[in-house]
């Protein structure tokens, strides 16, 4: 999950994805809405910036910018902690007061409280753990259910944090409901970052501005042009997988990027690191050490479309599609 692979002093961007155990279709509209709200709450607590996301019936995707850990004021620590409990119980209200008094007094527990809260912030694994645990508790309580809700681990890809890599990954995430055949236009699917930005969500729009900060003054327009193809305002359709495989593998051809983004492309969940060749090359040593591999991995250009300068660290051979 590459918890440690971060650029020194620079926020790291990750695409993280988690599936419901057994692939069960347990998330209806109500569940997706609760998960969406929890996503924003946990992001505020953790200090991570959600750039875009998508909630599906048996999995969810999130593209997040994770800052370096910094020392926070006691007031900010307490504010973030309270964000996790918008409707506190009597016990939680008492706990807030206890923590606040301890921090103000600087007693023996104060430093331990600071360390415990800070350890859960600015960290991808802690962010995903908190989000998934909180939603699991809510889901099981509201569905008279017991046991594990999510598969144990989540997948993550380290993404170069600007330009073509970031923009392409964001488009891939927002196109999830199109690939699933739920809508022809992701703006009509209320549980993704693009749709929330279109509907006026300020935090979601801020995420799109971050994605397109170096390219266009109108992030909604820029994102839409990438999703549908330059100059196209019509609806998008998922390309047939068998047809795509024939073009890519039998005819050794290329598909337009806007078309192939409507396929389930393994690079975006299994590529490990996604960015320019130079960016990916900069992490080969860390990736090798983390996985205790004997040989340094190769940097592989992405296949199947004109991806620009995009490369990945995981070679998928011919199995581009899931």
Image: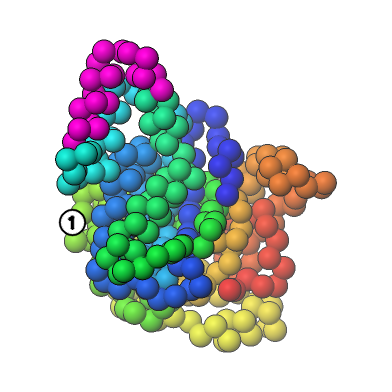
Q: In the shown orientation, is residue 165 left or right of residue 193?
A: right
- Residue displayed at 64% across by 78% down: 248
The C terminus, quarter of image: bottom right
The residue where tag 1 is placed is: 200
In this rendering, the answer to whether 220 lies above or below 319 is: above
Say if 294 sits above or below 141 in the image: above
Q: Does the magenta run of residues contain 218? A: no
Q: Residue at x 29, y 53 (%)?
A: 38
Q: Which contiguous range is marked in magenta?
A: 93-112
113 vs 280, nearest the viewer: 113
Could you tell whether 235 is left or right of 21 in the image? Answer: left
Is 158 in front, or is 279? Answer: 158
The quarter of the displayed image where residue 198 is located: bottom left
Residue 139 image point, x, y percent:
32, 63
Disc 1 residue crowd, few under 14, some 14–19, many 20+, Cα 10 Å: few
How many circles with numbers are drawn on the protein? 1
Magenta-drawn stretch contains 98: yes
| Residue found at x 61% / y 58% | 271
**For numbered disc 1, what is the local secondary structure?**
loop
In the picture, measured across the screen, residue 185 lies left or right of residue 268, that is left
């Amino acid at each position: 999950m590459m918890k440690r692979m971060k650029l020194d002093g620079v926020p790291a961007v990750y695409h993280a994805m988690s599936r419901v155990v057994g692939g069960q279709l347990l998330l209806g509209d109500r569940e997706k809405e609760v998960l969406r709200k929890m996503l924003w709450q946990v992001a505020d607590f953790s200090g991570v910036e959600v750039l875009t996301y998508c909630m599906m019936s048996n999995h969810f995707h999130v593209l997040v910018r994770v800052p370096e850990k910094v020392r926070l004021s006691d007031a900010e620590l307490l504010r973030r902690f309270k964000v996790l409990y918008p409707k506190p119980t009597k016990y939680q209200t008492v706990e807030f007061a206890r923590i606040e008094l301890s921090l103000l007094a600087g007693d023996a527990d104060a430093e331990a409280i600071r360390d415990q809260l800070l350890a859960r912030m600015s960290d991808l694994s802690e962010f995903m753990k908190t989000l998934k645990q909180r939603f699991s508790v809510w889901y099981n309580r509201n569905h008279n259910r017991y046991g594990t809700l999510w598969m144990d681990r989540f997948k993550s890809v380290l993404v170069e944090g600007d330009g073509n890599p970031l923009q392409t990954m964001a488009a891939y995430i927002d196109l999830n409901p199109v690939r699933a055949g739920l809508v022809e236009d992701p703006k009509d699917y209320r549980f993704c970052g693009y749709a929330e930005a279109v509907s006026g969500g300020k935090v979601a729009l801020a995420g799109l501005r971050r994605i397109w900060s170096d390219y266009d003054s109108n992030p909604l327009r820029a994102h839409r042009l990438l999703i549908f193809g330059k100059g196209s305002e019509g609806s998008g359709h998922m390309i047939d997988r068998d047809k795509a495989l024939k073009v890519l593998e039998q005819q050794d051809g290329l598909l337009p990027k806007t078309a192939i983004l409507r396929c389930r492309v393994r690079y975006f969940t299994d590529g490990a690191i996604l960015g320019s060749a130079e960016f990916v090359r900069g992490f080969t040593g860390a990736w090798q050490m983390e996985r205790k591999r004997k040989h340094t991995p190769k940097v592989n250009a992405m296949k199947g479309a004109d991806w620009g300068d995009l490369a990945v660290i995981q070679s998928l051979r011919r199995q581009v599609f899931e």
